[in-house]
């Protein structure tokens, strides 16, 4: 993951890929992002909502025990900063949902990033394509940087 210095918002799929999948190229790119966060090579932010998304998906697919362990690991990633879902984020989320017709959780992620003036999001979620407020960095792009 060369030349990826800076401040990024990191979406939940980056943390879910290594837990749920094995042989996809995106898994290795996700691990590179996580390692860069842990080493302090990039400043990484995510919403407190991300914990909910990760816990929910892992519990649904792998069970409660795995979800609890994954949630614990997620909350303790060195260098990962959490943006609290407060009234300002909620109101901004509604505006972004109305403006772009994106899913509610993606509106929360976008609003969280905007509140911290973060201009780039690492995600494979195409809901973030062509939004004026943020640039989407896909995992395949990370593999080529």
Image (cartoon, helix red, strand yellow):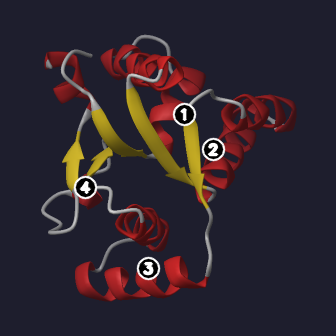
**Residues at circles 2 and 1 in contact by the CB criterion of under 8 Å:** yes
Q: Nearer the viewer, residue 92 or 30?
A: 92
Circle 3 is placed at which residue position? 93
| Secondary structure state at the residue bearing disc 4 | loop
Residue 131 makes an appearance in the image: yes
In the image, taking residue 66 as reference, residue 107 lies left or right, namely: left
Q: How many marks?
A: 4
Q: Mark 4 or mark 1, which is nearer to you? A: 4
| Callout 1 secondary element | helix
- Horizontal and vertical percent position of residue 21: 51, 21
**Residue linked to disc 1:** 16
Indicate which disc, 2 or 1, sits on the residue closer to the N terminus: 1
Could you give the CA–CA distance between mark 4 and mark 2, rounded to whole angstroms? 23 Å
Marks 4 and 1, Cα distance to the nearest angstrom? 22 Å
Q: CA distance from mark 3 to mark 1?
A: 23 Å
Q: Are marks 2 and 3 in contact (CB under 8 Å)?
A: no
Give x and y (percent) for residue 129: 18, 57
Res. 57 image quadrant: top right
Q: Earlier in the sequence, mark 4 or mark 2?
A: 2
Tell me whether circle 4 and circle 2 mark residues in contact (CB < 8 Å): no
Q: Which residue is mark 2?
A: 54
Check whether the beta carbons of the residues at disc 3 and disc 4 lie within 8 A of each other. Answer: no
- Residues at marks 2 and 1, CA–CA distance in whole angstroms: 6 Å
Q: Residue at x 46, y 65 (%)?
A: 112
User: Mark 4 highlights which residue?
Assistant: 119
Front disc: 3 or 1: 3
């Amino acid at each position: 993951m060369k030349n990826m210095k800076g401040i990024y918002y990191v979406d939940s799929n980056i943390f879910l890929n290594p837990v749920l999948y094995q042989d996809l190229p995106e898994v290795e790119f996700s691990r590179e992002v996580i390692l860069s966060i842990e080493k302090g090579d990039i400043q990484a932010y995510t919403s407190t909502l991300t914990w909910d998304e990760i816990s929910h998906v892992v519990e649904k697919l792998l069970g409660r025990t795995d979800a609890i362990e994954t949630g614990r690991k997620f909350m303790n990633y060195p260098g990962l900063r959490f943006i609290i879902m407060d009234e300002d984020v909620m109101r901004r989320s509604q505006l972004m949902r109305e403006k772009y017709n994106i899913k509610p959780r993606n509106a929360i992620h976008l609003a969280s990033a905007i509140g911290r003036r973060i201009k780039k999001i690492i995600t494979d979620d195409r809901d973030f394509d062509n939004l004026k407020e943020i640039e989407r960095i896909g995992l395949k792009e990370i593999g080529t940087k």
